[in-house]
Image (spheres, rainbow, N blue to C red):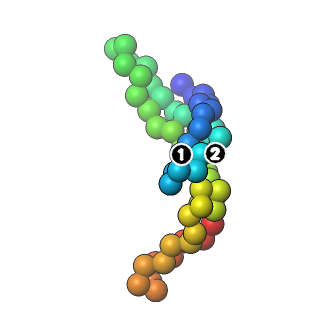
Amino acid sequence: INFKVAGDLTVREATQPVTFDVTATLQGGALTGTATTTILMSAFGVGPIEIAGILGTED
């Protein structure tokens, strides 16, 4: 089953509307699955992360 779930995501006291793409399975009365979305860290007041100059992220 594929569907979308819309709602609000709060990170570090900043709330933004998001939509998740969901892939789920209904089996024996239980719904299990995964949900993914893409966000910009800057939308939540989080800057790029760098660890020891080796690992880093972008917005």
> Of 23 and 41, which appears nearest the observer?
41
Query: Relative to 33, is 45 on the left or the right?
Result: right
User: Amino acid under label 1?
Assistant: Thr
Q: Is residue 33 above or below residue 26?
A: below
* Mark closer to the chain start, 1 or 2: 1
Q: Residues within 10 Å of mark 2 (few under 14, many from 20)?
A: few
Query: Relative to 54, is 7 on the left or the right?
Result: right
Q: Is residue 29 above or below residue 11?
A: above
Residue pointed to by mark 1: 10
The quadrant of the rendering that contains the N terminus is top right
Residue pointed to by mark 2: 16
> Of 17 and 21, which appears nearest the observer?
17
The quadrant of the rendering that contains the C terminus is bottom right
What's the residue at 44%, 32% (across, down)? Answer: 33
Q: Residue furthest left?
A: 28
Q: Quadrant of residue 40?
A: bottom right
